[in-house]
Image: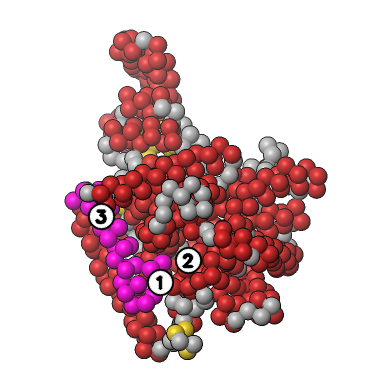
Amino acid sequence: MEHGNILLTHAMLYLAAAVVAAMAAHRLGLASVAGYLVAGVVIGPFGLALVGQEKDVHAFAELGVVFLLFVIGLELEPRRLWSMRNQLAGLGLAQVAGCGAAIALVALLLGADWRLAVVAGTALSLSSTALALQPLTERGALGSRGGQATFAVLLFQDIAAIPMLALLPLLSVSGGRSTFSWLDLAISAIAVVATLTVGHFLARPVFRHIARTRLREVFTAFALFLVLGVALTFQRFGLSMALGAFLAGMLLAESEYRHEIEAAVEPFKGLLLGLFFISVGMSMDFGVLMQHPLLIAGIIVGMLALKGAVLWFIAGKVGLPPDERALFILLLAQGGEFAFVIVGVATGNNVIAGDRGSALTLAVALSMLATPFLLLLYDRVLVPRMNVAGPPTTSRPADAPQRGKVILVGLGRMGQVVSRLLAASGYPPTVLDDDPDHVEQSRQFGFRVFYGDATRVDLLHAAGADEAALLVITLDRAEDITRLAGIVRKHFPNLRIVSRAHDMRHMFALRDLGVEVIERETWLGALKLGETALAMACGEPERAGRMARAFATHDLEVQAKLYEVHLKDPDAQVAVSNELRDRIARQLREDAAE
């Protein structure tokens, strides 16, 4: 029990440090990653020494990187990668290859071993996705040319980290000799192929059967089992756990359960990733800084200078506007979280010595710590004095509508028509539906539909509700429509809503929630059916059409009057409705007499 109490005490310290660090970083306007790193330093052996065995928590915290790679794999659909192929092949490849080669070459010229030069080049060429995307999003600059270029580079880095992690163990040495083995390489390749094959034929059918049970906890349990199972299998064959998780995510990127899986894994990814950065802060060896301060400072300055020069050259070649180049370079010049993983794999496989790995890790961590403060310097000093474009002002013209900015919930009879119309017009929606059988059938007919309960805020986040321009609600049950509209109004106030309504009373409830456009599901069909019946009854199609149009105009007046009464005096609705009904009856009889 004493050992258990120690584990609980350590868990409490880690969670408390994570909460305090995130809140403090947010209060100071910094990225949460910086807060986690500082928290790790404070509670680690070079701070208050509240926790001694940082290696234990670091081993557990590596699962955060595993889940991060899994979610990145989920987001990298083949079609999306293909649409960005030019930027990825141009910007991304040029940045990684250029920075990596420059750093490795300088390391060789300074007398470093070639393996250390390769590790330093690959690790230091990468940037922090978490630290770079948050400032771009906050500034509203993600849609600018510089923002798109930054995103393309970061995306390529995420992809490039996978082969880097896979190839590092091949550089391993033991007793001064390389441990490279063609047999190990063949076994690794077989493990990759087997994972992809088994996963393709097993994972989706299992998710489908679990979805039919509607037991969310079982769905979450299998998602976690899949990630950890694939990761541990790859580790068993001498490969990176992160590589296995990435491939598992890629495997499910086209699955109809993609958003539901992402929503299930996201909380664990965020918590474990925060724990990972805390463990990195704890393991920062400031003894190395005290012994070799010039070496650490040289690594940091050299990394920033070399990467900055390469990025400036790339920005000029692709024609980035001069006022966007400074932020482009600043966001990509620092080290990144994957450097910790690459250096960890390199030291764990005896590719480089442990003290060299500690120096590289410390330099990367310090560069990440410095980035938020450099951004403050950029905003408060460089932008005013150098006339560099800061956050967009209100004079910026409105962006043109972009494809993929529509979310449609419910692919029933109405939803299919709306989805087909939007897709045919060049605005294919992201469709969510909570019936697994319906989802499977709809995908066979070419609908791009995903399984999930859209009333869950985490699923809406995963589907892109933060950035979407429009939400179309075509669910069957009135109470589900009202509930979803209320959730969206609360958590996504800027998201415009178009919804079906069962009847006028339901329409009023949605209007109370602020839904902009509402269509009663049977109104148009019933009006057309009534017009046809009237034409057959009176034998005058033209007269029937005229009376139907008059009735439609009258209905708009009824809606306005009854909604006004609904707000002021609901008990008077019956009397007002009868009065309006008698009025239209008299009007139509007079029209018929004329």
The residue that label 1 is drawn on is: 240
State the separation of the CA atoms marked 2 and 1.
10 Å
Q: Nearer the viewer, residue 109 or 396?
A: 109
Quadrant occupied by the C terminus = top left
Q: How would you rate the neighbour count of disc 2 (Cα within 10 Å): few for under 14, some for 14-19, many for 20 or more? A: some
The residue shown at (45%, 87%) is 175
Find out whether the residues at labels 1 and 3 contact each other: C-beta distance under 8 Å: no
Closest to the observer: 152 or 103? 103
Q: Nearer the viewer, residue 462 or 380?
A: 380
The amino acid on which the numbered mark 2 sits, given as a three-letter code, is: Val
Q: Earlier in the sequence, mark 2 or mark 1?
A: 1
Residue found at the far left of this picture: 213
Q: Which residue is mark 3?
A: 221
Disc 2 target residue: 341
Could one spot residue 152 in this view of the protein? no
Q: Please state the extent of the stretch shown in magenta in the rendering.
A: 213-242
Q: Point out the tag, 1 or 3, that comes first from the N-terminus.
A: 3
Q: Are marks 3 and 2 in contact (CB under 8 Å)?
A: no
What amino acid is labelled 1 in the image? Ser
Residue 81, horizontal then vertical, whole percent: 50, 66
Q: CA distance from mark 3 to mark 2?
A: 26 Å
Main SS class of the magenta portion in the image: helix
In percent of width and height, residue 64 lies at: 41, 57
Look at 71% across and 64% down and name the residue there.
305
CA separation in Å, label 1 and label 3? 23 Å
Render colour scheme: secondary structure
Is 105 on the left or on the right of 185, as rendered? Answer: right
Residue 280 location (% of width, % of height)? 49, 57
The reply, left or right, for residue 523 in relation to residue 280 is left
Any magenta on residue 558? no
